[in-house]
């Protein structure tokens, strides 16, 4: 840039020298004794004087000056200090969204009712504890979700209750999900986990397909390896002790807000379908799925950030302190 500027300065001086020559040449006819050779000698002496006073030109060429001439045009009138300040300001701009990459504990609650044999239509709920791995790319989050623990409850559980054995939970695979971040009208960051459908202990060509209804359907699988098609849940209560093997389909959608870089919470939209493949208690041949209740705010989720090396065992052992239970 320095050489280009000097080149520009030199050309400017030559321009004024040429103007001087033009003025002299206009006086030659006056007979003052000045010849064309004298004029050329004057120009050469002017160039020598300029080069002597600017030795930098001896180490540069017209080619190098031309190379940087565009740079001079672009920057010669810029304030370099201001330019540096602008770059520093860009580097110090806060990211649009907090970094949510990492390992998280998640509690999800399905709240509704169930039409249970003997009990009838009763309030019921499902508490689920998951280990979630999140990888964030700007406003998008890729999620790996593993079920760690599930518990079922109902308002008459002193008489009868369903529970999920460890074999059921261990049989559930990692589920891959996607979530999105955005700024809402309240000035906060919204979290939206798109619809995720889990098909359990069977295969369907399309998620909208109906579940199998018979154990000998080729689509039914024995996920918990107990020798019975489907995965088993247990029923215990007064005069009742039964095993029920089911296939199941569940979808969830999460909508909430990023409370902080280590907490996300909001509401859960969900639905469940199930079909019984086998049971040793005939009253449960139609199953006992839970249906969403009228109060949408009772179905919710909470995500709490953990250390990267946390696992399902940690989530289960610390769930009370993590989620304030």
Image: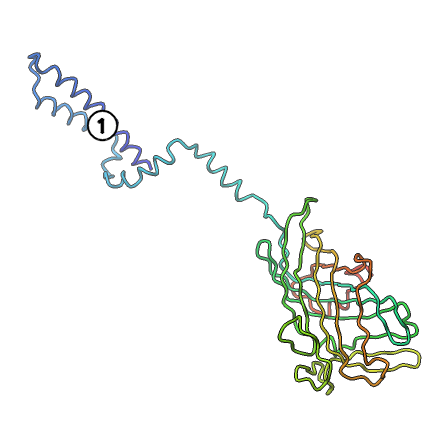
Residue 94 relative to residue 223: left or right: left
Res 226 → quadrant: bottom right
Quarter of the image holding residue 301? bottom right
Please state the horizontal and vertical placement of residue 280, each as a whole percent of the image: 83, 86
**Between residues 285 and 97, which one lies in front from this camera angle?**
285
Mark 1 lies on a secondary structure that is: helix
Q: In which quarter of the image is the N terminus?
A: top left
Asked whether 273 or 153 is in front, the reply is 273
Residue 304 picture quarter: bottom right
Q: On screen, 192 above or below 218?
A: above
The structure's colour scheme is rainbow
Q: Residue at x 24, y 30 (%)?
A: 11
Label 1 CA crowd tier, 10 Å (few <14, some 14–19, many 20+):
some
Residue 252 image position (x, y, % from top left) = 71, 64
- Left/right placement of residue 83 relative to residue 22 reads right
What residue did someone put label 1 on?
A: 50
Q: Is residue 254 above or below residue 166?
A: above
Image-based side of 22 in relation to 133, left or right: left
Q: Residue, x 66% and y 70% (percent of image)?
A: 208
Q: How many labels does the image show?
A: 1
> Residue 145 vs residue 324: left or right?
left
Query: Which quadrant would the C terminus be assigned to in this image?
Result: bottom right
Identify the residue at image location x=53%, y=40%: 89
Q: Where is residue 282 in the image (x, y as percent from the top left)?
A: 85, 83
Q: Where is residue 75 in the image (x, y as percent from the top left)?
A: 38, 35
Above or below for 286 versus 250: below
**225, above or below 116, in the image:** below
């Amino acid at each position: 840039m320095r050489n280009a500027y000097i080149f520009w300065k030199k050309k400017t001086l030559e321009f004024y020298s040429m103007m001087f020559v033009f003025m002299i040449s206009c006086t030659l006819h006056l007979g003052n004794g000045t010849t064309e050779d004298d004029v050329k000698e004057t120009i050469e002496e002017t160039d020598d004087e300029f080069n002597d006073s600017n030795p930098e030109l001896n180490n540069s060429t017209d080619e190098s000056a031309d190379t940087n001439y565009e740079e001079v045009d672009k920057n010669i009138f810029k304030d370099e200090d201001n330019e540096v300040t602008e770059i520093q300001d860009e580097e110090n701009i806060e990211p649009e969204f907090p970094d949510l990459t990492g390992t998280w504990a998640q509690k999800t609650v399905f709240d509704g009712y169930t039409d249970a044999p003997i009990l009838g239509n009763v309030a019921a709920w499902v508490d689920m504890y998951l280990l979630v791995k999140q990888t964030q790319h700007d406003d998008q989050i890729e999620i790996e979700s593993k079920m760690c623990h599930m518990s079922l409850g109902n308002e008459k559980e002193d008489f009868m209750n369903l529970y999920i054995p460890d074999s059921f939970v261990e049989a559930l695979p990692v589920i891959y999900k996607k979530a999105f971040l955005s700024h809402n009208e309240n000035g906060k960051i919204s979290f939206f986990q798109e619809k995720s459908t889990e098909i359990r202990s069977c295969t369907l060509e399309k998620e909208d397909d109906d579940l199998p209804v018979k154990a000998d359907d080729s689509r039914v699988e024995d996920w918990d390896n107990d020798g019975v098609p489907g995965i088993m849940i247990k029923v215990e209560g007064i005069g009742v002790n039964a095993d029920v093997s089911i296939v199941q389909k569940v979808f969830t959608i999460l909508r909430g807000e990023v409370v902080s870089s280590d907490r996300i919470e909001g509401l859960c939209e969900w639905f469940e379908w199930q079909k019984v493949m086998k049971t040793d208690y005939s009253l449960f041949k139609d199953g006992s799925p839970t249906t969403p209740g009228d109060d949408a705010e009772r179905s919710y989720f909470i995500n709490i950030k953990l250390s990267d090396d946390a696992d399902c065992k940690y989530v289960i052992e610390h769930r009370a302190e993590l989620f304030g239970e």
